[in-house]
Amino acid sequence: MNKLQIAEKMAAKHNLSKNKMVEIIDDLTDLIVSTVKGGEEVVLVGFGTFSSHQRKGREGVNPQNPAEKITIPSVVVPKFKAGKRFKDALKN
């Protein structure tokens, strides 16, 4: 399911236009991204937690020349931990 399909279903359920629902979804995702980028967590109880995680730098190999070593820098990556209600729904 993609964003437009979600917007169609949610718009029908809440008696809103599809365009308005796409705008709401975009605002929600922008808010989640900016909050996590600022170092905070976003917790949607029962669904999950969005956060960021620092992945350590490491030594790697160049895939085009396996004999050559390269340094992979540390980077901040997004992290999602599913909530209990979400996990339980998938189990049943």
Image: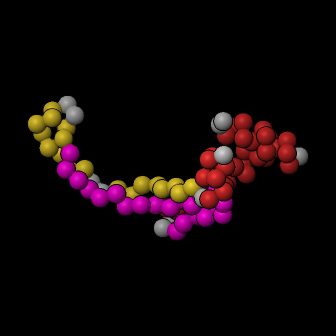
Where residue 78 sits: x, y (%)?
Answer: 47, 55
Q: Is residue 76 among the parts visible in the rendering?
A: yes
Question: How many numbered badges does the structure rendering display?
Answer: 0
Most distant residue in the top direction: 64
Which of the 4 image quarters holds residue 54? bottom left
Using residue 63 as the reference point, say whether residue 38 is left or right of it: right
Where residue 90 sits: x, y (%)?
Answer: 63, 46
Q: Is residue 5 above or below residue 35?
A: above
Where residue 23 sits: x, y (%)?
Answer: 72, 48
> What colouring does the structure picture have?
secondary structure
Q: Is residue 19 among the parts visible in the rendering?
A: no
Q: Is residue 2 above or below residue 45?
A: above
Q: Is residue 26 above or below residue 44?
A: above
Where residue 38 sits: x, y (%)?
Answer: 50, 66
The reply to whether the magenta stretch includes residue 50 is yes
Which quarter of the rendering shows the N terminus?
A: top right
Query: Which is nearer the eye, 50 or 27?
Result: 50
Say which residue appears at 20% left-offset and 45% top-offset.
Answer: 60
Which of the 4 image quarters holds residue 2? top right
**Would you say the magenta stretch is mainly helix, strand or loop?**
strand
Which of the 4 image quarters holds residue 12? top right
Give the magenta part as a residue range.
40-60
Using residue 33 as the reference point, say whether residue 63 is left or right of it: left
